[in-house]
Image: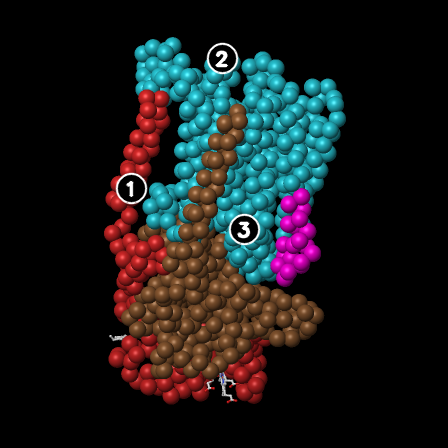
Chain colours: A brown, B cyan, C red
Amino acid sequence: MNKDRRNFIKQTGWSILGGGLLISVFPLLPGSAHASKNKNHIFAFIVDIEKCIGCGKCVNACIKENSVPNDFYRTWVERYHILENGEVIVDSPDGGSDGFKPQEFKHKVEKAFFVPKLCNHCKKPNCVQVCPVVATYVSKEGVVLVDDKHCVGCSYCVQACPYGARFINPETRTADKCTWCYHRIKKGYKPACVLVCPTGARQFGRIDDPESPVHKTVKEKMLQILKPETGNEPMTMYLGLDKEVR
Amino acid sequence: MHEIVTSGFLFPNEIEVHWSIMIVIYPYITGLVAGAFIVSSLYHVFGVKELKPIAKFSLVGAFCFLNFACTPLLFHLGHPERAFNIMFTPKFTSAMSGFGYIYSFYLVLVLLEIWFVFRPQIVSMALESTGLKKLFYWFLALGNYDLSEKTLAIDRKLILFLAAIGIPSACLLHGYVGFLFGSLKSNPWWSTPLMPVIFLMSAIVSGIAVLIICYWIVMKAKGMKPDNNCLKCLYKYLWGFFIVDLTLEMLEILTMYYEAHEEWHIISRMLTERLGFSYIILQMSICSVIPMILLGIVSLTNMKDSTRNTLGIFSSALILIQVLAMRWNVVIGGQLFSKSLRGLTTYNLPFFGREGLAMAVVLVALPFITMYVFNLILPVWQKEVPKAEG
Amino acid sequence: MRHYNHVIRFAIILTAVLIGFFAVRGFIVPESFGVYGTYMYGYHRGNSDSEEAAQPILYYGSDKCRKCHEKLYEQESQAGHSKIACESCHANWQAHNNNTRNKVLKNGSIEACMQCHKKLSARPAAFPQITDIKQHMDDQEQEFEKGMECLDCHDPHEPL
């Protein structure tokens, strides 16, 4: 027994040491648990809330352009009503794809606005961090993409996205989300939602290109992002965001 | 099917609950593994002599649960045929991609330990039987019938070693399942460093409880007398671990309540409006307070064996429900409120179908059926060959 | 050593399983995996981004329409709807291309205008909005007749 004890202690010691070594190797691997250090996030998406009229053309165009399945949205528009008594009422019927109907409230509406939402294409994307099979990744241009031929459909990324931008596509049974219309921007077109926006509430382009519509905004304007506390560093940025928006 | 009832505002993609009952029973079964293994290690490594009658059985239990720990996941995956991608192309930053490796490592470890423990029995079965059966046992013994004293001594050493590294591995396996949830910063109901510890503690608790019940049922079925010392010891351990488990669960919710971050208002609404039964009534009152008191009485006072066993087994059953409720509340609860913190959805559990209740019941029953089959192949309750014990 | 015989047998089986694992892995993992880097940030199926980029485009933008609808394009670019892409109100070019005389392409109903011009509290105050057509008529001090449409007075391409 005594010998067993000694052996046990020895062996446990070794296994703890081994485990410790194994764990300590992880931070040494290139790159920390986050961040795509070697990626250029050259694109930015600017949403100007003061310009959005909530017509839903963007949602519709996105659904057509990317054949998004029913009841799921790659982009959607939310409507906020902030009432006099402090109540906040938010709605997004069918993702706002058919526009909005007027709404009546018991209290006076203090302010109201629309907030278009889409994938934030974060610099430190949560969803990429957690994907167990590398089916979602940051592309060379800093666009977060999903490889639907490799995805196992575990929906861990859906849980990890703080913005609700991801869903499981019922047709492919894999994760799906906004790609900033990767197939379009690669050929020099604007994303479909940006193209059809009648008021220019959605702007997209390269940050480093002085010709691009976002260049000046990014360099000069006061911008906000959604849920900065998550540390995801979104590249979709907002002008005139209210504190009530999550 | 019922309509999904939502209240308030949810992001349009959040209406559907993506992680279904399969993800509830996955940590449940994994937890039973960890718990059962800890019990066997209590005997093999920490020398808790009272647990000897159940040491072998708990190992077999751990093995049988372990075989099915991944099955619920396969039923949940959108592409189960690609499941091995998790091991083929792992992402080192992903908590989930480690699971394939940790699981396989642990499976091999438990398999090895079981093999060493049962080797004398396998060999004697091989020597006794004839024909195909003999071939089968020959195969199980890997064609080696060496039972000399020296070889058995080696086996004992290896069993000790495996049991010893098995403890951190079991903790890793289950603490890790907690980490899966605890590391998701997007979800305030999950994202707490306490999550892995709570999962681990509740895993141990559920493992001990399921062993108590199984042991008792098997003894009754075989017409044998259960070893009351062993049961008494198990009740004590169950009580001890349950105290820690419940304290942690209380601490978690108290901290959340007291800190009252912006998400608290929706979490409290979720707990009262959606999880009123499974959280407040099951997890936090009936199935926790009653076993806590009963087990306290059972552990601290002297009473008739039959009374003690009735109370103990009743508490174990309640604890099993408590842990299941806890898994449900964590997994389903975390998806019932919107990440916009403005609304609640509902989860409608279908009865049939790939992710239905019926399938879940079948999956939970499978390990027990395996246990039965295992016992047919290698009788667990055989008294002879005591030499084999570590 | 003789006493370790059974352990060695187990070890051999384990090794075989391990080798099998790597063999299957080599067979299954797509070739382009990790061409942008190994095991960290470039690590993904290399062809997947080009596959994504190969998706067909449906919306081509107003410049596409200009070629054949020069007059309307010029007309629109002068007026209040100048910033609106043709494909916002009409179907996308892909649909048009496949079906030249599709009636779905144009929608001059009141609802179509109202999707953008309906008075909503959430719309920016500066944006021209009307409560409904009757109110709009009253504002113009005109008689409202049943069956009146926006297009009676406004050209969608040159609204004012």
Residue type marked 3: Gly
The magenta span reads: B247-269
Residue at the spot x=31%, y=39% of the render?
C21
Give the letter of the chain under mark 3: B
Which residue is the site of mark 2?
Answer: B384
Residue at the spot x=58%, y=13% of the render?
B223
Residue at the spot x=64%, y=57% of the render?
B264
Where's residue C58, x and y in %? 32, 67
Q: Quadrant of residue B49?
A: top right
Compared with residue A75, is residue B346 higher up or lower down, i.e. above or below?
above
Q: Residues within 10 Å of mark 2 (few under 14, many from 20)?
A: few
Residue type marked 2: Glu
The quadrant of the rendering that contains the C terminus of chain A is: bottom right
Residue type marked 1: Phe
Which residue is the site of mark 3?
Answer: B182
Q: Nearer the viewer, residue A158 or B215?
A: B215
What's the magenta bit mostly, secondary-structure-wise? helix
Q: Name the front one of labels 2 and 3.
A: 2
Residue C22: give its label: 1
Compared with residue B111, is residue B255 higher up or lower down, i.e. above or below?
below
Report whether A111 appears left or right of C151: right
Residue A4: within the magenta? Answer: no
Q: Nearer the viewer, residue A173 or C160?
A: A173
